Image: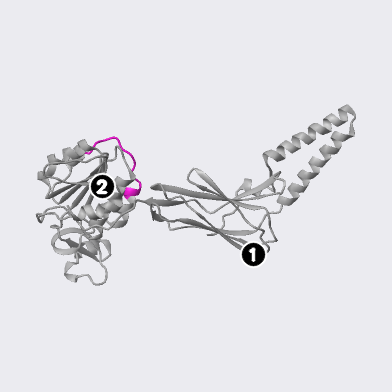
Amino acid sequence: MRTPPPAPWQRLTAVLTPLGWGTLAGSLALYAAGFALGYPEPVVLATGGLLALAAALAWTAPRPRLEVRREVTPLKVPRGDAAVAVLNVTNLGRGLSGLRAQDRIGAAEHTVDLPRLPKGAVRTVSYPLPTDARGEIPVGPLLLVRADPFGLTRRVRSYGSPVTLLVRPRTVALPVPPSGRAHHLEGPTSDNAPSGTVTFHTLREYVVGDDLRHVHWRSSARTGTLMVRQLIDASLPTTTVVLDTRALTELAVDVAASVALAAATAGFPVRLVTGDGPVPDAKDPETVLDRLARVSTGTGGVTEPMRLARGGGSLVLVTPDPAEAGRVAGVRRRFDRVICVYVGPGSVAVPGVAVLPIGSLDALPLAWGSR
């Protein structure tokens, strides 16, 4: 990344640290006491303090010429997997020492002491990033601090821009839940449904290989871009995943992500719903994981969202609440298949509904296969 020009406060030759300001105040006080009392010893000590400050300012005054690049890899990672920040520092000027990198990671700060940098030297340092909690983790801004050996002065400059590490849910491979029967031709559609010859869905730009019989000439003439009709198979079963977020656990999110990802990867329409309403734009595998990475604890139950959800296809409820698991029986007639993944303590039985009690994500594939 190109290093931005320094801000006005970064162009200062050096700034005093709290210890530096304390040394300056103490030296002035010693001078005043020495002259007032007529003792030479306080004056000698004050002179030593001021000389130390002068040496510290001379140490940090030269502005370093550095090329700095910090990369976060990967930018999206499943919870618990490794993610690292890689810092590359190139010294384009004279030799430097006393350099320290400070990188803010979430609410914490990570400090790395860099070894001496001779002219033209390159130093590469990597440090792990926390991925034990799902969600967005801001990384940066990156600060390079050069301090004198006494800690009296320092020069600080920021490099680059903050980036965001997205920690996604963990997932396991699952087969798509069977819907039981095909949908009516006027059923739900989705952008990621495979191309077909059944129902008009939308207009899109022409790509090489499209059937020229599907070109919409009127829209092409109006926009100046060749447009084609996108026809989809509307009979594909939809998987509706309802996630109870009132007592949200990482296991519940992992289960919901695994089920939704299985359907999206196979090209089937997916609907994600929480107690706070539908999760928007969860259509393809990437957006499914991105949206669930940002899901937080909610306040609403899932009974009403289940009642309002469009019927047909499969309904998969993920909940730690036995009461919510029991209420899923009230909507089973509106869906071709209803599955309840129960992630709470004990066991639950719901008449007419396949209930899968899960204590860990690794147990999900076996229970899913036996439903």
Q: Relative to residue 277, is residue 164 drawn left or right?
A: right
Q: Nearer the viewer, residue 254 or 351?
A: 351
Which region shows up in magenta? 291-302
Coordinates of residue 300 in the picture (x, y in percent): 26, 35
Magenta stretch secondary structure, dominant: loop
Furthest residue in direction front, as rendered: 346
User: Mark 1 or mark 2: which is in front?
Assistant: 2
Query: Residue 82 occupies which quadrant of the picture?
Result: bottom left
- Residue carrying label 1: 121
Q: Secondary structure at mark 1?
A: loop
Q: Nearer the viewer, residue 279 or 334?
A: 334
Coordinates of residue 143 in the picture (x, y in percent): 58, 50
- Residue carrying label 2: 358
- Amino acid at the residue labelled 1: Ala
Above or below, 276 relative to 104: above
Q: Secondary structure at mark 2?
A: loop
Query: Residue 199 occupies which quadrant of the picture?
Result: bottom left
Residue 281 in magenta stretch: no
- Amino acid at the residue labelled 2: Ile
Q: How far is disc 1 from disc 2 in space, using C-alphas?
A: 54 Å
Residue 294 in magenta stretch: yes
Which labelled disc corresponds to residue 339?
none
Give me the residue at 71% from left, 38% from top: 21
Coordinates of residue 289 in the picture (x, y in percent): 32, 53
